[in-house]
Structure formats: structure tokens, C-alpha cells
């Protein structure tokens, strides 16, 4: 085949837009003809230099870095909260209040920390929205499951709660019940806050990794 025909085919060959027969012709010719090989090399070198000067890989690298910083910061923060919760729990003398710090601080923070494992599977999610909604759901379910386990572990029950105050003086009742409801309520509020943090931070994480 003539060199000018081959040189017309080279761009199509590079873009993989030619048929199998043309592809074979071009390859066979390039092995024999140094002039056409030089044209081919010139065109592919152009493409390579354009790729390296492109800014997209650089910004995506910075975003990857930001994403891993976000993930590490959240891991560290939840670990810190767990440590504080365990320290508070350990400082509470054994009695009815046993397990309150575990229930309200350690359990929600642990559920949140475990839910971050889901972030390693981001590529399996179809969209940013699906990922952030599922992350929020996983955080909630992990906290509820761990909370139930914690409830069985400390043998909490509404009957214990009533028994503890049944027959106590009115002063004890009105001092104790709101305090305990407040403590339970703080755990529920903390759980809700962590679910929201999970939703928004996973959304930001997906955005940094260029997920649509
Ligand atoms: Zn040629």
C-alpha cells in the first residue's frame, strides 16, 4: 500500500477507529517503512505529551489526598471519643448508672467508626447519593445493633428503670428520672448527629473522588 494512504490511516489506527483489515495493513507497513513509522511515532508522542501536561490527574491526586485526610480525621475523632467515653465509664462507680457512658458515648462513636469501613467500597456504588444515603443507614444500623447488644450486656430494661425509682421519695424520683431521661436522650441525639455527619461527610468524600 502507498505511504500516503497509510499515513491517512494512522490517526484512525491510533484512535482504534479502523477495521481489522486496515489495522493489519498499517501494522505490516509500519514494520517495513521507516518514514511512516516516524510519522506514527510523532503522532503518538504528541498524544503522550498532551496527557502529561493535562491538569486533571494533578487535581484528582490532590482530591484523593483530601479524601484520605477526611477519612483519617473522622477515624481519629471517633477513636478519641471512644477513649473519652471508656474513661468516663470506668470512672463511674458500679451501680445503676453503670453503662450510661458506654450507651450514650462509646456505642454511637463505635458504630460511626465501623461504618467508615463502608467507604472502602465506594466504587461499588452507582452514585454519590446512593453512597451517602447508604453510609448514613449503615451508621444508624450499626449504632442500633451495638446499642441492643449493650442493652443486653448491662441488662437494661424499662422494669429496672421503674423498679429503681418505685417507692423512692418524690424528691429522688424527680431528681433521678429527668437525669436518666436526659442521659438516654443525649445518646439518641448523638446518634442522630452522627448519622447526619455520616451522610454529609460521605457525600463530600464521594465528591472528592469524582463520583457523580
Ligand atoms: Zn510508508
Image: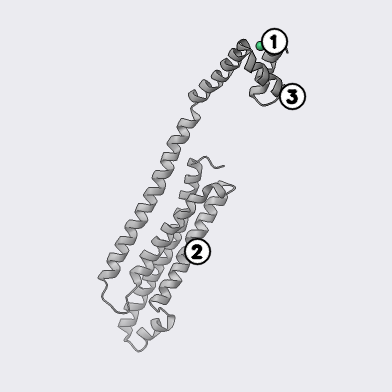
Tell which tag, 1 or 2, sits nearer the viewer. 1
Residue 194: horizontal and vertical position, in percent? 43, 58
Q: Residue at x 58, y 47 (%)?
A: 127
Q: Alpha-carbon distance for marks 1 and 2?
A: 67 Å
Q: Which residue is mark 1?
A: 4
Residue 12: horizontal and vertical position, in percent? 68, 21
Q: Quadrant of ligand 1?
A: top right
Q: Does the CB distance between marks 3 and 2 fall below 8 Å?
A: no
Residue 106: horizontal and vertical position, in percent? 36, 64
Q: Is residue 39 left or right of residue 142?
A: right
Secondary structure, mark 2, is helix
- Whichever of callouts 3 and 2 sits on the residue coming sooner in the sequence is 3
Q: Which residue is mark 2?
A: 141
Q: Alpha-carbon distance for marks 1 and 3?
A: 17 Å
**Where is 107 relative to 153, above or below?**
above
Q: Which residue is mark 3?
A: 21
- Whichever of callouts 1 and 2 sits on the residue coming sooner in the sequence is 1
From the image, which quarter does the C terminus lie in?
Answer: top right
Q: Residue at x 50, y 42 (%)?
A: 207
User: Closer to the camera, 33 or 168?
Assistant: 33
Q: Alpha-carbon distance for marks 3 and 2?
A: 58 Å
- Whichever of callouts 1 and 3 sits on the residue coming sooner in the sequence is 1
**Where is 18 relative to 192, above or below?**
above
Q: Is residue 159 left or right of residue 37?
A: left
**Where is 4 relative to 166, above or below?**
above
Secondary structure, mark 1, is helix
Amino acid at each position: 500500500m502507498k505511504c500516503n494512504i497509510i499515513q491517512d490511516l494512522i490517526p484512525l489506527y491510533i484512535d482504534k477507529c479502523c477495521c481489522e483489515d486496515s489495522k493489519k495493513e498499517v501494522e505490516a507497513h509500519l514494520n517495513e517503512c521507516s518514514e511512516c513509522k516516524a510519522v506514527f511515532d510523532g503522532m503518538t508522542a504528541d498524544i503522550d505529551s498532551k496527557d502529561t501536561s493535562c491538569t486533571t490527574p494533578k487535581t484528582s491526586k490532590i482530591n484523593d489526598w483530601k479524601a484520605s485526610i477526611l477519612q483519617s480525621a473522622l477515624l481519629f475523632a471517633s477513636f478519641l471519643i471512644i477513649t473519652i467515653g471508656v474513661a468516663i465509664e470506668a470512672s463511674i462507680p458500679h451501680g445503676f448508672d453503670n453503662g450510661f457512658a458506654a450507651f450514650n458515648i462509646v456505642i454511637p462513636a463505635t458504630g460511626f467508626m465501623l461504618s467508615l469501613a463502608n467507604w472502602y467500597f465506594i466504587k461499588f456504588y452507582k452514585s454519590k447519593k446512593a453512597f451517602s444515603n447508604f453510609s448514613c443507614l449503615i451508621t444508624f444500623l450499626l449504632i442500633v445493633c451495638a446499642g441492643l447488644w449493650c442493652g443486653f450486656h448491662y441488662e437494661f430494661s424499662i422494669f429496672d428503670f421503674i423498679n429503681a425509682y418505685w417507692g423512692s421519695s418524690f424528691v429522688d424520683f424527680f431528681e433521678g428520672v429527668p437525669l436518666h431521661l436526659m442521659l438516654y436522650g443525649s445518646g439518641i441525639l448523638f446518634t442522630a448527629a452522627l448519622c447526619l455527619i455520616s451522610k454529609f461527610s460521605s457525600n463530600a468524600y464521594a465528591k472528592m473522588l469524582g463520583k457523580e
